[in-house]
Amino acid sequence: MPQAPTDARPQIKHLNDMDWEMNRFGSLRKFSFHPSADKPTQPNAGVLRYDAGKVLVTHRHDFAQVW
């Protein structure tokens, strides 16, 4: 079946090819996808790395999130 011109191409990323970034709560993250001003409906998908004893603080998301 031919691909329609409006279909988005898949984005393939490997976590080993991404740098760790500091997030707003002081832990490290690698986000494959994250909403931005130019892509506000982009899903939020990635991994977080916490030091021993640290926890994810209660916070708010102002966008749709799928668990």
Image (cartoon, rainbow, N blue to C red):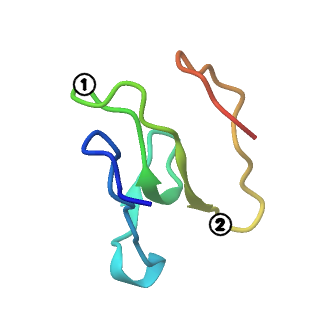
* Above/below status of 33 relative to 1: above
Report the side of 35 relative to 39 (left or right). Answer: right
Q: Nearer the viewer, residue 8 or 22?
A: 8
Q: Label 2: how many residues lie within 10 Å, few (<14), some (14-19) or many (20+)?
A: few
Report the side of 17 relative to 28 (left or right). Answer: left
Q: Nearer the viewer, mark 1 or mark 2?
A: 1
Q: Quadrant of residue 1?
A: bottom left
Looking at the picture, how far across and down is residue 5, in whole percent? 24, 45
Q: At x 21% / y 28%, what residue is drawn?
A: 38
Q: Label 1: how many residues lie within 10 Å, few (<14), some (14-19) or many (20+)?
A: few
Q: At x 53% / y 55%, what residue is drawn?
A: 27
* Above/below status of 34 relative to 50: above
Say which mark, if any, is on residue 66.
none
Looking at the rendered structure, the kind of residue marked 2 is Asp
Q: Quadrant of residue 59?
A: top right
**Mark 1 or mark 2: which comes first in sequence?**
1
Looking at the picture, how far across and down is residue 15, in whole percent? 46, 76
Looking at the picture, how far across and down is residue 48, in whole percent? 59, 59
Q: Secondary structure at mark 2?
A: loop
Q: Which residue is mark 1?
A: 37
Report the side of 27 relative to 41 (left or right). Answer: right
Q: Quadrant of residue 53?
A: bottom right
Q: Nearer the viewer, residue 20 or 66?
A: 66
Q: Residue furthest top?
A: 62
Q: Quadrant of the C terminus?
A: top right
* Above/below status of 37 relative to 21: above
Say which mark, if any, is on residue 51.
2
Between the C-alphas of marks 1 and 2, the distance is 30 Å
Q: Residue furthest front?
A: 1
Looking at the rendered structure, the kind of residue marked 1 is Ala
Q: At x 73% / y 68%, what residue is drawn?
A: 52
* Above/below status of 19 relative to 26: below
